[in-house]
Image (cartoon, grey):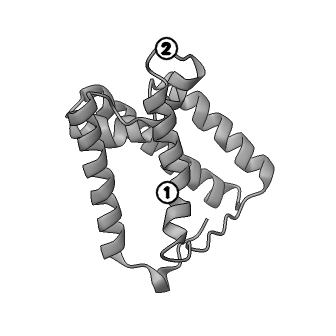
Amino acid sequence: MSVDWNHFTPFTALAGGALIGIAAAMFVLLNGRIAGISGVLGGLLRPSSGDVAWRVAFVLGLVGAPWVYLLFAALPRVRIDAGYGALILAGLLVGVGTRYGAGCTSGHGVCGLSRLSPRSLVATAAFMGAGFATVFVARHLFGV
């Protein structure tokens, strides 16, 4: 995946980050729940009584938001410089990592860090470090 630096605008990135932060804060303040995607999806795989509707609405919002965005503007062009095998392997590794880390980037990195959770700080440092190391090895040692 590459960034189109000629059309990158830091203000839209900042606004997007602020919206994510506001949404996560509202979610925890209004519902008392963490907006961690792996936890939301995991709850759908092992549903509890009275706990499914909000999870389905959350996932539909994630999937539906790009379609609503399309009503106002074109989606940015995405180019991923990897084959299907690498993408499938990466997805599986991320899934395994979220199980071992008891959460994902949204749960630990956005919601946990904002609550000053020491566990989330360690988890975020671990997955960021692993990501940095993976990119270094893939690009500089394997030339991918």
Query: Which element is circle 1 on?
Result: helix
For the C terminus, the image quarter is bottom right
Q: Is residue 91 visible?
A: yes
Q: Is residue 124 visible?
A: no
Say which residue appears at 44% left-offset and 21% top-offset: 51
Residue on which disc 1 sits: 65
**Of pointers 2 and 1, the one earlier in the residue sequence:** 2
**Residue at point 23% right, 35% down?**
30
Identify which residue, 32 or 113, lies in the foreground. Answer: 32
Secondary structure under tag 2 reads loop
Task: Identify the residue position indicated by label 2 in the image.
Answer: 48
Residue most extreme to the bottom: 6
Number of numbered tags placed on the structure image: 2
Vertical placement of residue 91 versus 32, above or below: below
The three-letter code of the residue at mark 2 reads Ser
The image quadrant that residue 97 belongs to is top right
Tell me whether circle 2 and circle 1 mark residues in contact (CB < 8 Å).
Answer: no
Where residue 127 appears, as percent x and y from the top left, is 46, 39
Tell me where residue 141 appears, x and y as whole percent.
Answer: 66, 55
Distance (Cα) linking label 2 and label 1 = 26 Å
Left or right? Give the position of 32 relative to 77.
left
Q: Residue furthest top?
A: 49
Which residue shows up at 50% across the image and 48% down it? Answer: 62
Q: Give the residue type at disc 1.
A: Ala
Residue 143 x %, y %: 70, 62
Residue in the foreground of this view, choosing between 115 and 56: 56
